[in-house]
Amino acid sequence: MNAVSSLGFVGLGVMGAPMCNNLAAKSGLAVAGFDNVPEAIARMQGAAFHPCQSLAQVADNADVVFLSLPAVKQVAEVCRGPGGLFAHKGRVKIVVDMSTSAVKETRELAGEAAQHGITWLDAPVARLREAARLGTLSIMVGGPKEAYDTVLPYLKCMGSDITHCGAVGAGQTVKILNNMIVFMTAHALSEALLIGREAGVDPKLLFETMALGSSDSFVLRNIGLKALVPGIFPLLAFPTEYAIKDISLALELARDGGVVAEQATRTHALLEKTRDAGYAKEYYPVMIKLLEAMIKKP
């Protein structure tokens, strides 16, 4: 495609807002931004950020549009809906979906985008809100290499580790499986904490010592020590309902591939019980409360 002269960003939520801020601050280009919550647009800052009142306005002012939305349902609405990016193409040449979206639907959207002369890249992100703020996300990309090369300088504004994983859908596959492992590890750490505590070992000491050995991991040092040990599960972190969505996508991939994912199925069931117990909005390691309630004293 021709040189990129302006960018768009749709979805200015907990992750999208800091990602868009970094894009506007570092890319050297104007960023046309939109969210269906007016307050989210009003919170954005910086001379390079240009607030838009509609998706059509974004499409008219951006060669490349980045999406950061809750799920593939919202991605489809932004693209297929009245006045969306497909109906009102404007000048858009590339759409980069940085949401975590189902693989099958991602490939369907990519096919529809091609019919409108738009190239689709899936580029979901990993790591926490602080990484979004610092521009140190891990970004996993699926789609044509030429389009990847075109948007790479802009992805580098938001992430420090960017991987081209293969064709459309490959980025989503890698991200979904990454999250599946994270949730399963948090489940295992929750059980370890409770077993150790009931055996008389301080949870903080347990995890700090484990971090010195072969069970060390990012999940142990962050979710384990910063959430499970102190029992802090804030509402504005990654909620249980989001975790259920992502691990459900992993189980869908497993079924499509004929894989029996027993451990992931157990973690999915625990997350659903956690949601049903009233913790849908809390940071998902709150699952430990369900396990704690099942402790049977001798």
Image (cartoon, rainbow, N blue to C red):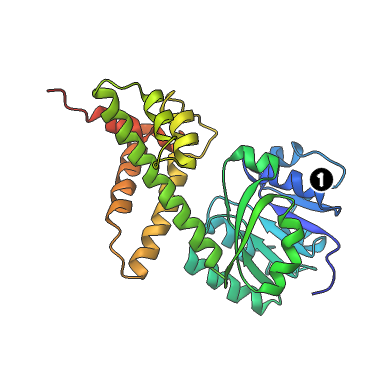
Tell me if 293 is positioned left or right of 159 in this view. left
Specify few, some or many for label 1: CA neighbours under 10 Å numbering under 14, 14-19, or 20 or more: some
Placement of 18 over or under 53, stated as above or below: above
Name the residue nearer the viewer: 20 or 112.
20
Between 266 and 235, the one lying in front of the other is 266
Q: Which residue is nearer to you in this view: 252 or 197? A: 197
In the image, residue 115 lies at what x, y percent? 65, 79
| x and y, in percent, of residue 164 in the image | 61, 65
- Across and down, in percent, residue 190 comes to 34, 34
Say if 160 sits above or below 60 in the image: above
Can residue 216 be seen in this snapshot?
yes
Q: Nearer the viewer, residue 223 or 104?
A: 223
222 left or right, relative to 25: left
Residue 292: x and y, percent?
28, 28
Q: Residue at x 40, y 30 (%)?
A: 209
Helix, strand or loop at mark 1: helix
Q: Quadrant of the N terminus?
A: bottom right
Return the residue at label 1. 25
Residue 88 appears in the figure: no
Residue beneath the point at 31% across and 70% down? 258
> Residue at the location (24% across, 24% down)?
199
